[in-house]
Amino acid sequence: MRPLAKGREFYTIYNEFRMFDPKAFVAGLPNMPGVYRMLGEGGEALYVGKARDLKKRVASYFQKQAASPRIQMMLTQVGLVEVTVTRSEGEALLLENNLIKSLAPRYNILFRDDKSYPYLMVTGHRYPRLGFHRGAKDRRNRYFGPFPHAYAVRESIQLLQRVFRLRTCEDTVFENRSRPCLLHQIRRCTAPCTGRIAPEPYAEDVRNAMLFLEGREDDVIQNLSDKMAAASEAQRYEEAAAYRDQVRALSRIQARQYVESNRGVDADVVACATDGAIPCVNLVMIRGGRHVGDRSFFPSNAEGAAEEEVITAFLEQHYLEQPAPALVVSSHPVELEGIEVVTPSHGERRVWLDMARKNALLAIAQRVRDRATQEGRLVALREALGLPEGAQRIECFDISHTMGEATVASCVVYDRQQMQKAEYRRFNIRGVTPGDDYAAMRQVLERRYERVSAEGGKIPDLILIDGGRGQVSVASATLRDLGLHQACILGVAKGPERKPGMEELILESEERSLELAPSHPGLHLIQQIRDEAHRFAIVGHRAQRGKARTTSMLNEIPGIGAKRRKALIEHFGGLRGVQAAAVDDIAKVAGISRPLAERIYRHLHAAS
């Protein structure tokens, strides 16, 4: 053994024995923190792990006591071990996670969660607004969360609107309103945009809302009760009634949503359950003492793994990407550096764990049902189309445009009995006659499969084309030109009156239409994939169309060049902000005179 790479942070040791000798290899390892990589005879990654003490950890794999069947199977395949020494266990954890992501080892339990978690945002504006937020944070704003789902954030925003009546409109809309919106009329906003509330009472509402989000609802209720009493003594009965309504609303929320007597706690509750060899981890989020929702995770490469292994893998991977709360309650004991993890045996926190475990079991049952449904649909479709038994990858294409404007094509992928969203692709179609769907279909298929062929990607077993015989004919000719003859092509044309279940299926290989009953499971799978392709194309098309129209509407105004157009967009935050602005506000933008502002206002309002 010899060090091959040395740097400030770590160095790597390689096993150089052609025939792997565990005893000799372990004898040369240091008693230091680091990461070990077990590789197969061909150099493929089998497992990546971290260790506080590399010598002890790697040696534990080759001791006489029986490991789990899963680990025993892995050890029979080990042909090489690589070891990287790090300065600390925390550094080893980061390196382990990076290697797992890049190598995707066969025996590592992997949790993939592409979605970032959403937050509730209170902006730093002079009249702060409530908003939904993902992504990078701005120091001027306050963020509460994270929440497990977008609807949990929106539910909290609606709750705060009912109680504290804070604004949710964008700043560009707020700055240019001349009269209150509908939310003020239904008592969901105090209309600071038009001066219906002074800055001081609005700021008090914001402070109370943030105390509520921090779990200090008792302080809020006491504060509102004191104000109600003072207003009543001063015979300001309408004001007192408003405070009374807020207190009642908060009391109802208290009774319904709080899960612990120690309110204000931020905690994650993590439980693992296994049923029918399917492991699932359920994460329950408690923020400010309120149960804000849960999410279930199904790991890869976890067959035969113990629940403790699954929980450990989840916590280590999850908190590298997400901020950890003050408390993590786990169904199995786990040590995490810098994070308090408890495994209660009784009390309220044990009730939380039981709830999370039930959620995990329900998620497993739902997945089993979904798999059975998807498997049945796929088998029925294979039989109907005469596809081989192993066929499972389906790609579907759809073209979306409005009268030829902003044409976008979508490609969605169905594989391994589920939609593979990470493999979806959109294509902006250019260089074809507007509205020529045939040319658009030819272009998207060429761009898609030229790249797949060049990169050695997967060729689908079935290609769905959202369209009739013309589109199918174009698709068939395009794939023949590309030398792809193995994929089956099926056109999905809308039937009479465009009703679901009445689709005409055009089988290219036999030049005939296929009739499937509306209740046929294979047709249901086709509809599911076709509808997803349609949705994905429309989302892309609307984004392109909106971007194009923003530019074109301002381009059409005489006297507006690129510099002034940019100044308007930046000042008002977009076309909608310019449209909402008054003439006087437009004239305040650098380079915009009063006559030009009037011309812009007339043009935009005539266009809308």
Image (tube, rainbow, N blue to C red):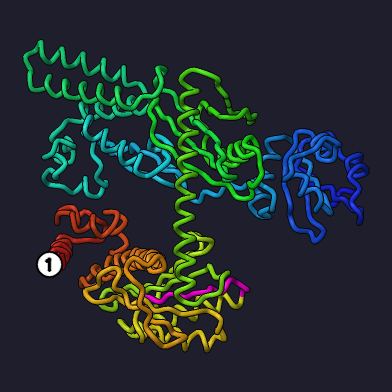
The residue positioned 44% from the left and 33% from the top of the image is 285
Q: Is residue 52 left or right of residue 97?
A: right
Q: Tell me the quarter of the image containing the C terminus.
A: bottom left
The residue positioned 17% from the left and 64% from the top of the image is 604
The amino acid at mark 1 is: Ala
Q: Position of residue 174 (x, y in %)?
A: 21, 45
Magenta stretch bounds = 455-466
Against 167, residue 332 (above or below) is above
Which residue is outermost to the top?
233
Task: Tell me, yes or no, if residue 425 can be seen here.
Answer: no
Tell me the quarter of the picture where residue 228 sits. Answer: top left
Q: Is residue 448 left or right of residue 156?
A: right
The residue positioned 50% from the left and 33% from the top of the image is 357
Query: Secondary structure under badge 1?
Result: helix
Q: How many marks?
A: 1
Q: Which residue is mark 1?
A: 606
The residue positioned 19% from the left and 56% from the top of the image is 586
